[in-house]
Image (cartoon, coloured by chain):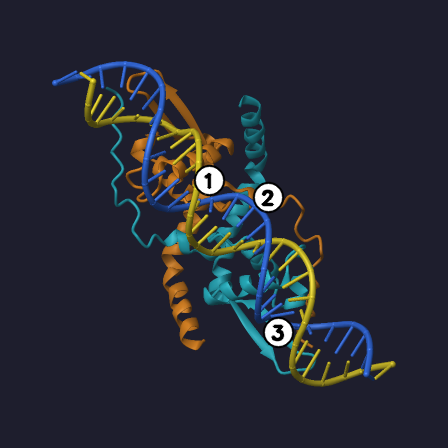
Chain colours: A orange, B cyan, C blue, D yellow
Amino acid sequence: MTQTALEPLPPDLFPADCPVESVPVLGGRKWAWKIMRCLESGPRRFSELRVPLVGITPKVLAESLRAMEQDGAVVRTEFDENPPRVEYALTPLGRTLLGPMDAMCAWSREHLGSLLAAREEYERAH
Amino acid sequence: MTQTALEPLPPDLFPADCPVESVPVLGGRKWAWKIMRCLESGPRRFSELRVPLVGITPKVLAESLRAMEQDGAVVRTEFDENPPRVEYALTPLGRTLLGPMDAMCAWSREHLGSLLAAREEYERAH
DNA sequence: GGTGCCGGTTACTTCAACGGTACCGGCGCC
DNA sequence: GGCGCCGGTACCGTTGAAGTAACCGGCACC
């Protein structure tokens, strides 16, 4: 035996409050990732965000922004002007997320081809 | 003016086939992340995976594994033994995802406290 | 012949996110 | 007075992942 037996996986491998599930951009919010990217270059207005986020409805954008605000990744600033102006910006905490996001984007750029090829191969074989 | 005006965001900022949406662990699959972690240490059997994935049903586990197999992140190997044995393992492609995942986990370990604090602060203020 | 293990499948239900359409108040402008 | 801009809200329908519960075939063991 040159190979040692694999340790069994313990039932408590993941704590009940497993942290990863709470990471903002990971939590099942379709647009969060793109919104982060839009705010990367500076504060943006609601209607300004709607331009690159093609197809998003104001409802979903408002919901997403509010969720990200709750998570402390985004600040909402209201200006007392006319017509009314509201700006959304990344918080320092939000900015710290850009690093890990870049890592994922780099992976995607490098390996997405293999992934799509695997999908086609799977279709072919089944 | 010491501050330059911010470039407006172009409507084509994100290509139609934006890659990030296709990253396996990012695509709305609740258990994918944990499954990756379970397979990190070596190949595992179906019933072996059910131990740490507390609360997962066989249906959802089978679905998740099949989706990850389609994406080329996991291989399924059937052995002609009795009782039947099936092993799931990470592919080389799947392993390349572990790096970016570690970056996200590190972020989570470091900043989850601030995130939860922000959520409480938001509750308090609204 | 009954029981258990293994790796699932099937049918049904639930739920949250998303999408579609319409509409709002307050102000300025013509 | 009518229209448009801004930053949304209200109501409703759709969708897809997840959860619930029951069951399956094949073989070994007793």
Looking at the rendered image, the quarter that the N terminus of chain A falls into is bottom right
The chain letter for the residue carrying disc 3 is B
- Badge 1 amino acid: Leu
Q: Which numbered tag is attached to residue A19?
A: 2
- Quadrant in which the C terminus of chain A is drawn: bottom left
Measured Cα–Cα span from mark 2 to mark 3: 30 Å
Question: Where does the image place residue A69, in percent across and percent down from the top left?
Answer: 47, 31
Q: Nearer the viewer, mark 1 or mark 3?
A: 3
In the image: residue A105, left or right of residue B32: left
Q: Position of residue A71 (x, y in %)?
A: 51, 34
Label 2 with label 3: CB-CB less than 8 Å: no
Q: Disc 3 marks which amino acid?
A: Val
- Where residue A97 is drawn, which disc sits there? 1
Residue at the spot of label 3: B86
Q: Are marks 2 and 1 on the same chain?
A: yes
Compare residues B67 and B113 and report the one nearer the observer: B67
Mark 2 vs mark 3: tell me if same chain: no
Viewer-closest of A55 and A12: A55
| Dot 1 and dot 3 residues touching (CB under 8 Å) | no
Can you tell which quarter of the image residue B31 is in? bottom right
Q: Is residue B40 visible?
A: no
